[in-house]
């Protein structure tokens, strides 16, 4: 059965692959699972039909058969569990890969999102100039620790896994900022993830949506 995911009809990131459907597309591409995409506008996301799938009125969602999921991490985990290629067979290695999935979403992503909020929504606040360096130093603390752990390895724990997929997806949110470049092994790690053929296919697919919306 072909799953259907939802994505922005017109992504505010202008096709940079920063919206969270990108990580779901990437996971599906890694395991070779074809998928359909239903594009939704900001207003459609808040309609009851979409909220029945996603209580918070957001993307991405994932539907297959009578199963409907929301939360990109849960969707990637579901894909990784149902297909070969994103989680190791060995039980302990699998548990560690899942741990990295949680680390990406609950330890790395929150301070990175805080920075986006600070730069996008708090720029006009009188305290913005004081707050931004504090937020950025919190990111640096985490990146320094992650950089130490990764060292010279290609991936976080042996072979590429769903943990790396989510970690790279989260770190990509720093693309365009100077912060990631302060950690050369993390920049190289992100570049390695972005060079994977499955990433390229997912990226091109979401970019094609933005291009079509801009020219159509
Ligand atoms: N925890 C949820 C998950 O991981 O799935 C968060 C889902 C979420 O934040 N979805 C966003 C959304 O639907 C899109 S991805 N927002 C619309 C709304 O809340 O009304 C977040 C996002 C949006 C835009 C950019 N960008 O332009 O760079 C980056 C990330």
Image: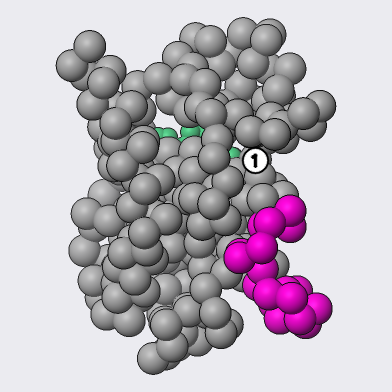
Q: Choose between 101 and 122: the one closer to the eye.
A: 101
| Image quarter of the C terminus | top left
On the image, which quarter does residue 95 sit in?
bottom right
| Residue 77, position as x, y percentages in the image | 68, 54
> Disc 1 designates what residue?
71
Cβ(mark 1) to ligand 1 < 8 Å?
yes
Q: Is residue 176 above or below residue 49?
A: below
Q: Is 23 left or right of 175, judged from the image as shown?
A: right
On the image, which quarter does residue 213 sit in?
top left
**Would you call the spot at circle 1 few (<14 residues within 10 Å), some (14-19), or many (20 or more)?**
some
User: Which residue is painted at 22% across and 54% down in the image?
Assistant: 176
Q: Is residue 189 above or below residue 153?
A: above
On the image, which quarter does residue 58 sit in?
top right
Q: Is residue 194 above or below residue 94?
A: above
- Do we see residue 109 in this rendering? no
Magenta segment: 80-97
User: Which residue is painted at 34% across and 71% down in the image?
Assistant: 192
Q: Is residue 134 above or below residue 73?
A: below
Task: Single out the residue that lies furthest toward the left.
Answer: 215
């Amino acid at each position: 059965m072909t799953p259907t995911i939802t994505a922005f009809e017109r992504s505010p990131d202008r096709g940079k692959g920063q919206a969270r459907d990108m990580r779901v597309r990437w996971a599906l591409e890694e395991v070779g699972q074809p998928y359909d995409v239903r594009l939704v506008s900001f207003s459609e996301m808040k309609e009851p039909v979409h909220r029945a799938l996603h209580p918070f009125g957001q993307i991405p969602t994932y539907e297959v058969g009578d199963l409907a999921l929301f939360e990109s991490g849960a969707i990637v985990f579901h894909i990784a569990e149902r297909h070969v290629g994103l989680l190791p067979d060995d039980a302990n290695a699998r548990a560690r890969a899942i741990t990295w999935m949680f680390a990406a979403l609950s330890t790395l992503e929150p301070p990175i999102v805080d920075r986006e909020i600070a730069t996008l929504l708090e720029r006009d606040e009188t305290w913005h100039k004081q707050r931004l360096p504090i937020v950025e130093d919190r990111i640096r603390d985490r990146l320094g620790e992650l950089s130490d752990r990764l060292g010279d390895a290609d991936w976080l724990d042996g072979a590429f896994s769903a943990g790396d997929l989510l970690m790279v997806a989260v770190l990509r949110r720093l693309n365009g900022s100077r912060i990631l470049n302060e950690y050369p092994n993390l920049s190289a790690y992100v570049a390695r993830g972005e060079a994977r053929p499955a990433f390229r296919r997912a990226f091109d697919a979401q970019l094609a949506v933005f291009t079509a919306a801009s020219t159509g």
